[in-house]
Amino acid sequence: LEGVTHALRTTEYNDRNEQYGWIQRALGLRRVRIREFSRVNFMNTVLSKRKLTWFVSEGIVTGWDDPRFPTVRGVVRRGIDVEALRQFMCAQGASRRIVNMEWGKFWAQNRQRIDVYAKRFMAIDKSENVKLVVTNGPTKEERAYASADYHPKDPSMGKRIVRLA
C-alpha cells in the first residue's frame, strides 16, 4: 500500500496470516512478505502491556521507565549499557522458537560489557548498617589509610583512599 515489501512481526499473529493474504488478494495489492520471530520471554516476569499499564495507572511504579519494569526504558534506567542490550538481542537472533530467558544471562551480558570502564566503589545502605564498637582500637590519630585502584585490572582509572581502621 505504501511501498511496504516486508513485515516483521512476532509469531503470536500466525492466526492472522490467512486473513492478511486474503485482504491483499481481494484488494489487488502487492504481496507483503511476512517474516516472523518469537518474542523473548523472561522467567517470572510480566511482559503484557495491558498488565504493565495497570501498574502505571495505579501509581505502583513511577512510569514506563521505572527501573523495576521490563521495558527498554526501565532497564536503561536500571543501568543496562545500550550496546550490551543490542548485543543481547542480536545474540537471540530471529528464531521462531519460544525462548524463556533468565534475567541473570541478560545482566551478565551487561557486566561483561561495562567491566572494562566501570570504576569499583563500596557502600553500605544506611538503613541496614549496624553500629560496631571496637575497644582498644586505634585512636583518630592512629587510623590507617591506604590507596586502592578504582579498577583492579586497569590502574589508569585512578586510585581511591580507603580507611583501614
Image (cartoon, rainbow, N blue to C red):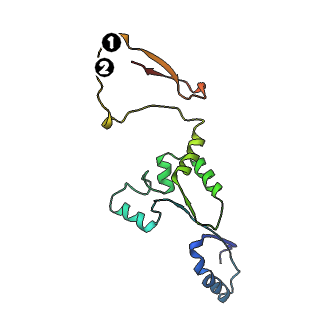
Q: Position of residue 138 (x, y in %)?
A: 35, 13
Q: Mark 1 or mark 2, which is nearer to you?
A: 2
Up the image or down, 2 lies above or below 151; here it is below
Q: Secondary structure at mark 2?
A: loop
Which quadrant: the N terminus?
bottom right
The mark total stands at 2
Reading the image, the residue beneath label 1 is: 139
Residue, far top: 141
Residue at (29%, 16%) from the top-left corner? 135
Residue hosting label 2: 134
Quarter in which the C terminus is drawn: top left
Residue 93, disc = none
Using residue 21 as the reference point, say whether residue 137 is left or right of it.
left
Q: Is residue 162 above or below residue 120?
A: above
- Residue count near mark 1 (Cα–Cα under 10 Å), binned few <14, some 14–19, many ≥20: few
Residue located 47% across and 47% down the image = 78
Expressed as whole percent of the image width and height from the top left, the position of residue 163 reads 42, 20
The front one of 67 and 105 is 105
- Against 41, residue 146 (above or below) is above
- Amino acid type of the residue tagged 1 in the rendering: Thr
Q: Amino acid at mark 2?
A: Val
Tell me the distance, in whole angstroms, between the alpha carbons under discs 1 and 2.
10 Å
- Pointer 1 and pointer 2: residues touching (CB < 8 Å)? no
As drawn, 50 above or below 130: below
Instruction: Please provide percent x and percent y for residue 57.
Output: 35, 63
Callout 1: SS: loop
- Position in image of residue 146 (x %, y %): 47, 17
Q: Is residue 59 left or right of residue 27?
A: left
Q: Categorize mark 2 by other alpha carbons within 10 Å: few (<14), some (14-19), many (20+).
A: few
In the image shown, does 165 or 117 lie closer to the viewer? Answer: 165
Q: Residue furthest bottom?
A: 26
Q: Quadrant of residue 93?
A: bottom right
